[in-house]
Amino acid sequence: MSLASNNQTKLRKLMVIKKKGYGFISSTGYPKDGYERVKCAVNLEAKEGSGLVINIKFLDLDLEPRYSRSDQCLRDYIVLTFIDREGLEHTSERICGNQKPELIQSMQSKLRVLFIATSPPLQHYLPNTNTSKRWKGFKLRFDFVKEETISVITSQFNDQNKRYRSECGGANLPNTLSENIQSPGFPSTYPPNVNCFWLIRVVPNKRIYIKIIDLELSPTLDYERAILSLIDGYSFGISSEEENQKINENNQKSSKILNFGSPRRDTKSISFYGNKSYYTEEGSLSYLSESNRVIIQFMTSDGPTQNQLAEYKKNNSPIGFRLLWTEVLSLIATSSDFPLNTDNENSVSQEENLDVITSDLCPGFVCLGGYFCLDSQSSVCVERNRLCINETLRCDGISNCAENDDSDEQYC
């Protein structure tokens, strides 16, 4: 597909359907005839529910270079705009010259490719010279790939002591329903200067519930020493492209890492620092994902304090973090979400009504939930989340329901 137009911007929309999962976009006249004045856009969009995300690879790039004084692409350039699951747009810097960007591996299923060329037709002047050249244009390949093929982000382990390197990062095996994840060196210590990533992935249309079991990162709310983050797996900027990591590490400059502006995390993501004493409200040490992917990030700049090490030696108080994640089939509505029609004399009781609702919605085990109160007088109480989990997790010796809900381990 080549991009060409004369006056107003032309917009083309390409939806990948069935087995066709790749294609090519190039400027008109590429590569022999060069391009003329053009303003054109192509929208790429995966079929809803397909589980596909977009990769972009530039095969060739030969446009007017950046102007030396401003270091900007002024007349001929490409702009890539990814649209995330929340409908927010993430726009790249202008792309021009002949330095091809690195492979762009996104977690998004929608992309707009915009090409603008305003330099004189058929003759493109080299900046700051009196000579002219006909630029070839560009060609890129787009691939719609299954999100399950996107691997975990490469962890960084910069501690000189490599003892716990193998414990920094990883991914769960397919069909895993529940598992523990803990920091490197747990429970006796954690290493300094590490950035560890774990990928939790369950099948599409399922969610992930996470409970923080142990949390001792610092004696105070010191986020610079160590921080634990739970990140939505489809957040913009979450990528596993290892070549980007290698380029940063080796200071290679032959390719360009594209800038999409300030990094942004999903509003559903959450971070923890300090220790459990700062998270006293029920639910403050748990997280329910909106999707089937979650990234766990553990980042440190220093190791534990001497007081923490002494406390572990004296009382075996764990240092670092330990969490439990569970695949959730669905979130069952509480009784307050379904007001009953008490005017009907044949209406069932509230408990009977909920039993009908949950049996229809949950093919596995329905956690009972229960109530917790927000004040010491028990005057304001709310119902806990009722999770629908796999039946095989019942009576396995591990509580997989919400905080303070052990109903899956009762009557075993």
Image (cartoon, rainbow, N blue to C red):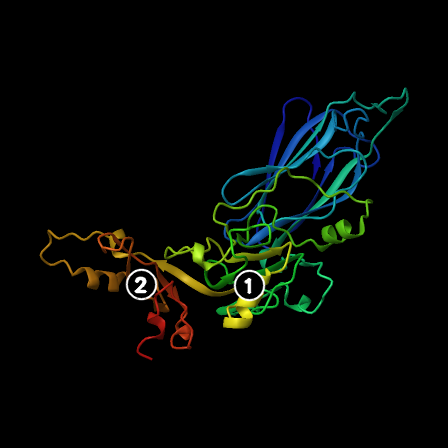
Amino acid at dot 2: Gly
Q: Check residue 409 in the rendering and tell me which mark sits there, or answer none.
A: none
Provide the secondary structure element on which disc 1 rests: helix
Task: Please tell me which residue lies in front, 306 or 131.
Answer: 306
Query: Circle 2 sits on which residue?
Result: 369
Position of residue 62 measured from the top left corner of the image (x, y, whole percent)? 81, 35
Estimate the spatial distance between the alpha carbons at disc 2 and disc 1, rounded to whole Å: 35 Å
Amino acid at dot 1: Gln
Task: Please tell me which residue lies in front, 310 or 72.
Answer: 310
One can see residue 20 in this view:
no
Task: Please tell me which residue lies in front, 302 or 64.
Answer: 302
Residue drawn at point x = 80 percent, y = 48 percent: 251
Residue drawn at point x = 31 percent, y = 56 percent: 333
Q: Earlier in the sequence, mark 2 or mark 1?
A: 1
The quadrant in which the C terminus is found is: bottom left
Q: Is residue 72 above or below residue 172?
A: above
Position of residue 71 measured from the top left corner of the image (x, y, whole percent)? 77, 29
Position of residue 122 measured from the top left corner of the image (x, y, whole percent)? 82, 24
The quadrant in which the N terminus is found is: top right
Q: Left of 379 or right of it: where is 81?
A: right
Query: Circle 1 sits on which residue?
Result: 308
